[in-house]
Image (tube, coloured by chain):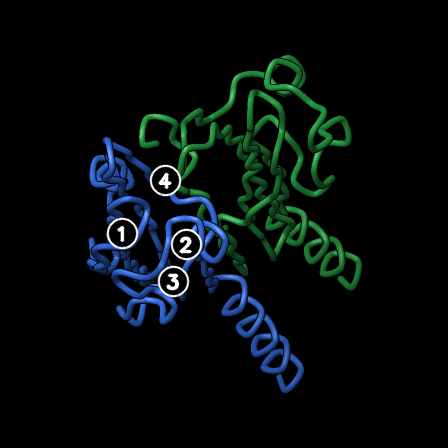
Chain colours: A blue, B green
Amino acid sequence: MTKSIFMLTIISIILFLLLSGCSKTRIGKVELSDETIPGFLKVGKTTAQEVLAKLGEPYGYQELKSRSAMIYLNYHEDYAHLLVTEIRIEKAFRLDLVFEDRVLSKAEIKKEGWGFDANVDPQLFQLIAR
Amino acid sequence: MRYFILLSAIGSIFMLASCSISTFGKFQADEGIPSFIKIGETTRKEIINNLGEPLVHRFVVGKETLIYNHERGEFFFLYGTYEGSELIIRFENKVVSEVKIEKTGSGWGVFAPATSNNPGTRRSAR
C-alpha cells in the first residue's frame, strides 16, 4: 500500500511537470517596455547616423526630401500553461523618430498593443510600420 | 511487472518527446558574415548573385542598403529556442562600404515553443 502511494505521488509529480510549460520571446533591437526614450536621443542634436550606429538598422525607414523617419519596434511575449490553464501576455511598443536634414526633430514612443491570452495581430504591426 | 513499468516509462518518454529545427532566410547568422563579402571590393551584383534577392533594398541616410534575414527555431523534447538576425550591407558607388549582423529577436521555451512571429521578416512591411 505504501509503495503504491509512493508510485502514485511520483507519477502525479511527473504528470504535473509534463503538463506545464512556459516561454519568453523578445523581438526588436531596442528595449522600449519602460516607455522612455533612449537617453542619447536629443532633439536638435542627435543625427540619423548616430541613431543607426547605436540602435541598429530600423524596422521601417522613409525619406522624402529633407525629412526622414525611422521606426523601431519592440515586442514582448510571455506564455505559460499549467494543466488546462494557459496565460499569454503580449506587449508591443513602437519608437518613432523624425529627422529634418538628418538631425532629430521628434522622438516618441507609443504602446501599440497588448494582449492577455490573445494575440497581438502581427499583420496590424506591418500596417502600423508602413 | 517490473518490465511492464519500465517499458511503459520508456514508451511514455518517446510519446512525449519531439524535436524540430526550422530555419528561414538566405544567409546563416551562426556562420557570421559570408566570407566572399569584402569591404571596398565586393559589388552589389556579386552580393545578389551569391545571396539572391534581399528581403529589403532601400536607401538609408543616403546609402544604398540591402538586408537579408535569418531566423532559426529549435525544439528538443523539453526545451526550445528562437533567434532572429539580419545581415545589413551598405554600398557606396555600388561597392560594399559596411557590413554587419544585427540580432532582431530571441526567445526560449520549456515545454512550449518560443514564438517566431517576427514582424521584421515580412517583406511587405519594410
Q: CA distance from mark 2 to mark 4?
A: 21 Å
Instruction: Identify the chain of the residue marked 2, using the numbered disc in the image.
Output: A
Instruction: Identify the chain of the residue marked 4, using the numbered disc in the image.
Output: B
At horizontal 41% and vertical 59% (from top left) the residue drawn is A30
The residue carrying mark 1 is A97
In the rendering, at what x and y percent does residue B112 appear?
49, 54
Does B110 appear above or below B27? below
Contact between labelled residues 2 and 1, with CB atoms less than 8 Å apart: yes
Q: CA distance from mark 1 to mark 2?
A: 9 Å
Local crowd size for mark 1, using a 10 Å CA cut-off: few (<14), some (14–19), many (≥20) = many
Callout 2 amino acid: Val
Q: Nearer the viewer, residue B75 or A49?
A: A49
Give the SS element for disc 1: strand
The residue carrying mark 4 is B119
Instruction: Establish whether labels 1 and 2 are both on one chain.
Output: yes
Give the SS element for disc 4: helix
Q: Which image quadrant: the C terminus of chain B?
A: top left
Comparing labels 2 and 4, the label whose residue is closer to the camera: 2
In the rendering, at what x and y percent does residue B6 appear?
76, 59
Comparing labels 4 and 1, the label whose residue is closer to the camera: 1
Q: Of callouts 3 and 2, which one flags the residue occurring earlier in the amino acid sequence?
A: 2
Question: Residue B4 appears in which quarter of the rendering?
Answer: bottom right
Callout 4 amino acid: Pro
Comparing labels 3 and 2, the label whose residue is closer to the camera: 2
Local crowd size for mark 4, using a 10 Å CA cut-off: few (<14), some (14–19), many (≥20) = many
The residue carrying mark 2 is A51
At horizontal 70% and vertical 43% (from top left) the residue drawn is B30
